[in-house]
Amino acid sequence: MFRYFPTNYVWNLSVDLAIEMGARIGEIEAMCAPLQEAAKQPDAEGTAAFRATWADMAEKLCSLAAEDEARGRLLSAGTKYKRAASYLLTCERLQGHGAPGRLELYRRFLEVFQRGITLAGDNCERVEIPYEGKVISGLYTRANNVQGPAPILVQLNGLDSTKEMKYLVGLPGWLAERGVSSLVIDQPGTGEALRLHGMTARFDAEHWARHVVDWLEQRDDVDASRIGCEGVSLGGYYCPRVVAMEPRFACGVVWGANHDWRDVQKKRLEKEGDFPVPHYWQHVCWVWGAKDVDDFMRIAEDVHLDGVVEKIRVPFLVTHGEKDTQIPLKWAHRTYEQLVNSPKRELKVFTDREGGAQHASFDNSINAGHVIADWVAETLGGRTKR
């Protein structure tokens, strides 16, 4: 794990995630060098300083991108806009719920990201899935060199990630090379669903997942018999839940198991384990629509997979980082042990040898991501060679 700030795990996590999304080391140095003292400050003061340097760099990149556009250099412009978007997202996710200007920062991020993928010509299309009078937004990446309907992997966020983060880290592109399409969504409790539509998380994730499958079944470029599901971090709870309860999913993968999130919350109340974001308790209350921490803890009682995983009857891959300090490795073993009815279950623990040993492999995602992409391709009928 790259530790720019020796005393601040949350900020180091954010920097590492930015690197996985394509940050450049010179820009990281320029953004982070002025923040050494701020990293030791209370949340609100420190995160405001973090936002200032990262947002400034993003806007500088946007200015440079605009100059490229004026000269017709659209590929260069698109690359800069995408990197700027990753910096805007990095500082947005550190802000507390209701922090002044946070929503405007998020909207700016969406605008810049869309500009970036459009000018760069990315294999990435924004889509909207009708859901209870609102929409679940997603990013759709088509399989490369596939004739007819292709297999697809639906990809779910964790507690504080977004569809753009997951796209930029790279799994949709790795799958496309292997003949598998991707749909990365902002499910309720994350991204646009939470910020723009007020849709909070729910433990019975199959409620919204079935709408996603319904939408995919209507597409003539999707093989409805080969729809898989992957979830990262808290998605390591959502994914097994929806695969267990929605029989139309053909396989499942967790990138970081999350078998008993209620237990993790109890441990965090006791100051055990690292937090993924500042203002943690305020954040989880917002995500789950709780009025206070006591209310949230009551909601969290349902967020576990005991009695659920046994219902999975399709292939399933459980992955976890050996050095995960957010979610203990024991929960990956619990999920695997309870997959008794899966015809093809596998547990992969990432170590320092291959990298990706930290939470959800944020320290080095590419080798871990290729393991997942290969397994999905083999399971859904894609390819692992040209």
Image (tube, helix red, strand yellow):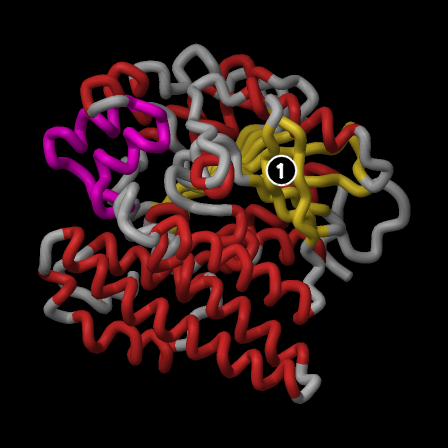
Horizontal side of 49 relative to 174 (left or right) equals left
Q: Residue at x 29, y 42 (%)?
A: 97
Residue 55, compared with residue 264, is above or below; it is: below
Q: Position of residue 223 (x, y in %)?
A: 81, 35
Relative depth, front residue between 43 and 317: 43
Front residue of this view, candidates 104 and 204: 104
Is residue 347 among the parts visible in the rendering? no
Q: Badge 1: how crowded within 10 Å, few (<14), some, or many (20+)?
A: many
Span colored in magenta: 262-290
Q: x, y percentage for residue 33? A: 22, 77
Q: Which quarter of the image is occupied by the C terminus?
A: bottom right
Q: Which secondary structure lies at badge 1?
A: strand
Q: Is residue 316 above or below residue 179?
A: above
Q: Residue at the spot x=63%, y=56% of the render?
A: 174
Decide whether residue 122 is among the magenta residues.
no
Query: Circle 1 sits on which residue?
Result: 154
Quarter of the image with the N terminus in it:
bottom left
Q: Position of residue 14 (x, y in %)?
A: 32, 57
Kind of residue indicated by mark 1: Val
Q: Residue furthest bottom?
A: 71
Residue in the picture at 10% in, 59% down: 41
Does the image show residue 40? yes
